[in-house]
């Protein structure tokens, strides 16, 4: 199980939480692509989104992901990474892609305010529309789909088992 691991899914699906635990358990480095973007641009995602628009934020995300050194890594991507075929193809050649699937009703319970998360969507799209659109993309890019609806521990165990 030396292969890199990439986690994809909606905001609130648990990518950062699950990813950091898996990295620790497997002795891998944990990387959060949203954090890389914020560090590179010295600004929160929401400010980058407000200043540049959602399409530019997606472009930035794609570029940052394609430049990650995938060497013994667990990567938590931003939820909109799947809009970039180039970024996703880059990740597919270097990692197992795991979709953390969570029903929208649970996402709404986990995410208080999408308006402050740097959520890269067309301004006129509802969260429900984005969820539906992205779910299809997540499914298409995933090697493994895991429902993250119970405990963090059971999700981590299921991922590690699926990767063996």
Image (cartoon, helix red, strand yellow):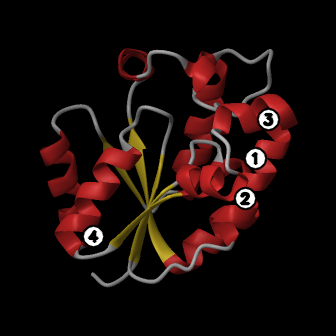
Which numbered dot is residue 58? Answer: 1
Q: Are marks 3 and 2 in contact (CB under 8 Å)?
A: no
Q: Earlier in the sequence, mark 4 or mark 3?
A: 3
Q: Residue at x 14, y 46 (%)?
A: 154
Provide the residue designation for mark 4. Answer: 163
Q: Determine whether the residue tagged by mark 3 lies in a helix, strand or loop.
A: helix
Provide the residue designation for mark 2. Answer: 62
Q: Residue at x 32, y 84 (%)?
A: 2
Q: Residue at x 30, y 57 (%)?
A: 20
How far apart are labels 4 and 3 at the CA level? Answer: 33 Å
How far apart are labels 4 and 1 at the CA level? Answer: 29 Å
Q: Residue at x 22, y 66 (%)?
A: 24
Residue 78: x and y in percent read 57, 47
Q: As rendered, which of 118 and 22 lies closer to the eye?
A: 118
Provide the residue designation for mark 3. Answer: 54
How far apart are labels 2 and 1 at the CA level? Answer: 6 Å
Indicate left or right for 96 with 49 as reference: left
Tell me the crowding category of disc 4: few under 14, some 14 to 19, or many 20 or more residues within 10 angstroms, Cα based.
some
Q: Earlier in the sequence, mark 4 or mark 1?
A: 1
Q: Are marks 4 and 1 in contact (CB under 8 Å)?
A: no
Q: Are marks 3 and 1 in contact (CB under 8 Å)?
A: yes
Tell me the crowding category of disc 3: few under 14, some 14 to 19, or many 20 or more residues within 10 angstroms, Cα based.
many
Indicate left or right for 15 with 28 as reference: right
């Amino acid at each position: 199980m030396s292969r890199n691991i990439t986690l994809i899914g909606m905001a609130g699906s648990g990518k950062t939480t699950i990813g950091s635990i898996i990295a620790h358990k497997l002795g891998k480095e944990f990387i959060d692509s949203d954090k890389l973007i914020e560090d590179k641009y010295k600004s929160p995602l929401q400010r980058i989104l407000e200043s540049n628009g959602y399409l530019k934020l997606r472009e930035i995300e794609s570029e940052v992901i394609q430049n990650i050194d995938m060497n013994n890594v667990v990567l938590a991507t931003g939820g909109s990474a799947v809009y970039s075929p180039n970024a996703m193809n880059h990740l597919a050649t270097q990692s197992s892609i795991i979709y953390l699937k969570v029903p929208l009703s649970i996402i709404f319970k986990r995410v208080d305010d999408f308006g402050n998360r740097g959520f890269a969507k067309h301004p006129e799209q509802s969260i429900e529309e984005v969820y539906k659109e992205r779910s299809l993309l997540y499914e298409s890019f995933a090697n493994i789909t895991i429902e993250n609806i119970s405990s963090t521990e059971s999700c981590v165990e299921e991922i590690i088992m699926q990767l063996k």
